[in-house]
Each structure stands twice: as structure tokens, then as C-alpha cells.
Amino acid sequence: NAGVTQTPKFQVLKTGQSMTLQCAQDMNHNSMYWYRQDPGMGLRLIYYSASEGTTDKGEVPNGYNVSRLNKREFSLRLESAAPSQTSVYFCASASSAKGEAFFGQGTRLTVV
Amino acid sequence: DQQVKQNSPSLSVQEGRISILNCDYTNSMFDYFLWYKKYPAEGPTFLISISSIKDKNEDGRFTVFLNKSAKHLSLHIVPSQPGDSAVYFCAASVDYKLSFGAGTTVTVRA
């Protein structure tokens, strides 16, 4: 079982470049999430999608956009990357509102 | 404004002893509380959860306690094992929004 798959695993961007982080899950989960992990800050919620067709802002949405393409896929877009967006990004999915989520392996993004 | 707080960045414990991790929250609307474990270069994995209507949940060596009046929860690991060395995140959920704390790094000494 693949679970939650994120691509790419590593990426280096120049300031001002754009890119999309892809996430797909094969567990038929309704809700999906994007987090960033920074030293001392833990996991901070960027955006989430409670179900197909809905998206909501999390704690740190500025500079990001998301698309819930279908039930399986939830992408995160950086329109104009900034060094402050250097981080490890995690995608997750869950079957219910209880919060028992499955995470991908992460994408390590560096913006120079 | 972080609604889930873990004030201890690290914890060192001897193998076989109890590990106690603490977490505080500010949003009284949270209805589920969870603990996740994370190894380096991997995504977090779900460990144990508790509903807001309960005050204790046990799963093997792991027990989570919830004190709603104090807006505080804790995770007890007994006995601690070397494989428990990891980062532990406290999390809370309301209406599908899942928020995490900053994490506590646990080191189990032989």
C-alpha cells in the first residue's frame, strides 16, 4: 500500500520562482492537509480540505494556494517563493474528523 | 497563535523508566486529542488518541490522560524502550482542523 505519496522529495528554488507540490492518497480518505515543519515550531497547518470540493486556511496560509483536484489529490502551490518558505512540507490524509491522519514522507524545499 | 503548546523541547529518560510528556491547549472546542511520533526523515505516525468526553485512554505501554478543566493532556510511556527515542507531537482536532504542538524530543538512555 502506497498510503500518502508526495512529490518531489527534494527541491531547490530561486527566490521568485513558482512550483507545485503534489500529494496523492490511495486510502479513500475524505480530508487532506498540508503542513510545514520548522525547527522549534513543530508542524504548522497551511491549508486543509475536509472533503472533495472544499478547502480552508490553516494557521500559516500566506504565500500558498491549494487545489483539491479530486478525492485522491491535494496540491500546494507557491506562486513566488521566498527564503522564509524554506521548510519541510508534509501532506496528510484522514478518514474522519477525529484527526487520526496518515502522513507522507515529506518534501524538503530550499529557497535561495 | 498556536493553540496547542508543548513547553518542554526535550526529555531524557533511562530505559525501563516512565516517560511523561505534557501538552496544553487553549481552544475549548477541540473534541479529539492525539499524540504522534516522528523519526528523522520520516512523516509523523499516529500513536494514540482520546475523545474530549474521556479522561484516560490506554494502549499497551502508552496512556493518554486528559484534564479538560486545566486544558492539559499528557502521554505516559511505561516502560520506556530505546525504540521510543523520537519526536512526539501533541495534536488536537475540531471540525477536521488538526493542529499540532512544537514537539518534544525524547531520548531513552540505555
Image (cartoon, coloured by chain):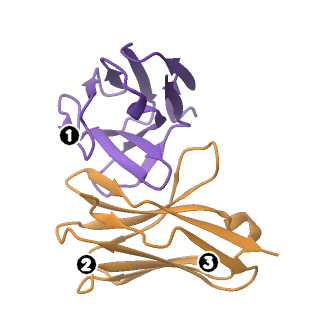
Of residue A13 and residue B15, the one placed in the foreground of this image is A13
For residue A1, which quarter of the picture? Answer: top right
Give the mark count.
3
Asked if labels 3 and 1 touch by Cβ distance under 8 angstroms, the answer is no
Specify the subunit that label 3 lies on: B
> What is the spatial separation of the Cα atoms under label 3 and label 2, in whole angstroms?
22 Å
Specify the subunit that label 1 lies on: A
> What is the spatial separation of the Cα atoms under label 1 and label 2, in whole angstroms?
27 Å
| Chain drawn orange in the picture | B
| Chain drawn purple in the picture | A
Instruction: List x then y, in percent, for residue A69.
Output: 28, 20
Of residue A46 and residue A98, the one placed in the foreground of this image is A46
Question: Is there any visible trace of residue A30 in the rendered image?
Answer: no
Disc 1 crowd rating (10 Å Cα; few below 14, some 14-19, many 20+) is: some
Q: What element carries label 2?
A: loop
Q: Which mark is residue A57?
A: 1
Looking at the image, residue A60 sits to the left or right of residue A88; the answer is left
Say which quadrant the N terminus of chain B sits in.
bottom left
Q: Residue A107 carries which label?
A: none
Give the label, 1 or 2, closer to the camera. 1
| Amino acid beneath label 3 | Arg
Of residue A105 and residue A14, the one placed in the foreground of this image is A14
| Amino acid beneath label 2 | Ile
> What is the spatial separation of the Cα atoms under label 1 and label 3, in whole angstroms?
36 Å
Say which quadrant the C terminus of chain B sits in.
bottom right
Which residue appears farthest toward the top when viewing the image?
A17
> Would you name the residue on which mark 2 appears?
B53
Q: Which mark is residue B61?
A: 3
